[in-house]
Amino acid sequence: MPFPAAAAARPEARHAPGRLALSNTIAIVDIGSNSVRLVVYEMLGRAPSQVFNEKEMAGLGRQVATTGRLADDAIEKAIEALLRFRILCEAMHVGEIRVIATAAARYAENGPAFIARAQEAIGQPIELISGGREAELSGLGVISGFHEADGVVGDLGGGSLELISVSGETVGPGASVPLGGLALQDRSKGSLKAAEKIVKDELDKLPQLAAMKGRDFYAVGGTWRALATLHQRRSNYPLNVMNGYAIPPRDAADFVRLVERADATTLEAIDAVSSARRPLLAYGALVLDELIKRGKPRSIVISAQGVREGLLYEQLPPEQRAGDPLLQAARDYNLLRARDPRHASELVDWTLGILRTAGATEALVPHRMIETVCLLSDIGWRAHPDYRGEQSMNVVAHAYFTGIDHTGRAFLAMTLFHRYAGLKDSSPAAEALKTLLEPTLLQQAQLIAAIFRVAYLLSAGMAGILPKIAAACEADRLVLRFPAELAALSSERVEGRLKQLARLLGRDFAIERG
């Protein structure tokens, strides 16, 4: 049965207020060596949200290195997953489906026969991508998800490892070697000692390692994300987010060597890793260990963005590629959740007016971060007043944001916490998150929160009021000026919050009416 057209029989009245769009969804089906995955994105854009994410650990690449063939049981698992994904895409009225297959299907002698069955199951053509193409897409995925990315991307799958250098919006030449977890387990016959020799021999061929020295190494792939999850749990890290999680090379090397030596079932927090992934942890650790030794990177940065996001990013026109994914995501949140989305742009100007007249510079908090936190500043209004601070903090800290590191996440989250909860309140989660911020950056978060607490008391989150109330630092005073028609907005509560803000700025305060 042919796959139905995207718009077929969709009711015109169908509406979902929590979605930006219903008709422009795009799905990526990734037939990998370890898993077959479906990810449906809300739309093609600079910061697309995931509507649905599902996978089947089919293990297509399990025996390819030694037998040269995809195993029959793995093929059946993959076909069943594709049939299921087809039904789900139809139910979600997906507008466009892209299907790719990687190393296992690429290397196996029965790969073409599998691709033919897989195309019939999913009802779409399948692009069998080369190792070089896979490396390119992984690099583009990292570029799409990191602000001014600079370093080497390594994408470890079940069948292969891809390496490629990235800088700004540019990718270098890529390389692909058969060092994926399943392939390495197969080639080494389950011996880590044999696997170590295979890894060293393969890595000796790669010029991309020289480009890694002193730069970031972006680690892409489920096995490396699983290792990072274990590292976070072991170190009691306060933010359970993978994208942008950075580990110093020495710390990472010590940890992966521990994983190489240990029985996976005895590792702390191993329950957080799927049972299908656990046997591959030691092989992923071994590859990462050798990359650190030879490449000498500045930092190991975990990336949740890879081939699938690269496919989306390369479809964008140049002007959209150049956009800031963090700001775009914040604009989407503002549109979906703020009481009056127009208010945010006025709040940006009002906040910057106070900060600039106070002598603040962008060295500590860049303009893009101030704009982002203003766009997010009204997302918690539907919650109970007693919990708005905690809830907003958790939403922002764990949101599907890209183009931001963990320090930036903590800054945004703590600003919103104090905007709702007040400057003196705290909670165990807030105290933990504060550990990711230097004291000066935490002070800036509290300062911006204090500005918001004045602004929202004056405006109720509605556009049209803040531009009429001047707020600026003049000499040793913070001055708030009301026009005659808005003089009644000046209240005892406004005065109390203005006094608190002025104290943070090291100034007295004054209110002028009319």
Image: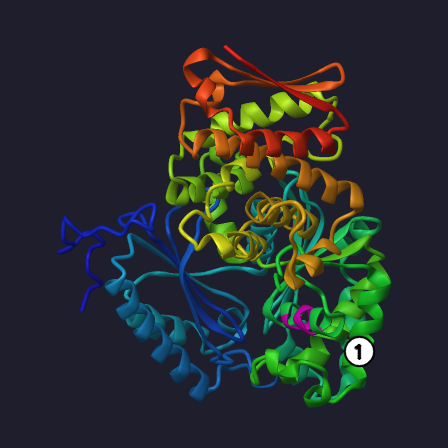
Residue 165, relative to residue 27: is it above or below?
A: above
Numbered disc 1: secondary structure: helix
Is 87 situated left or right of 314 in this image?
left
Residue plotted at (29% across, 49% down) = 17
Q: Is residue 344 magenta?
A: no
Task: Give the left or right position of residue 389, taking residue 285 as reference.
Answer: left
Could you say which quadrant of the image residue 135 lies in? bottom right
Task: Answer yes or no: is residue 450 visible.
Answer: yes
Across and down, in percent, residue 431 comes to 70, 58
Along the line of sight, the residue nearer the viewer: 225 or 373? 373
**Most distant residue in the front direction:** 492
Counting labels gives 1
> Measuring 68% from the left and 89% from the top, which residue is drawn there?
265
| Rendering coords of residue 132 (x, y %) | 59, 55
Q: Position of residue 267 (x, y in %)?
A: 72, 84
Q: Is residue 456 left or right of residue 283?
A: left
Q: Which sits in the foreground, 153 or 496?
A: 496
Q: Could you tell me the amino acid type at mark 1?
A: Glu
Q: Which residue is mark 1?
A: 196
- Counting other residues with Cα less than 10 Å from the Cα at mark 1, is it few (<14), some (14-19), or many (20 or more)? some
Q: Nearer the viewer, residue 303 or 317?
A: 303
Q: Which residues are magenta?
A: 226-230
- Residue visible at 55% across and 31% down in the picture: 492
Whether residue 324 is visible: no
**Quadrant of the image occupied by residue 358:** top right
* Residue positioned 60% across, 34% down in the render: 497
* Residue 190 on image: x %, y %: 70, 89
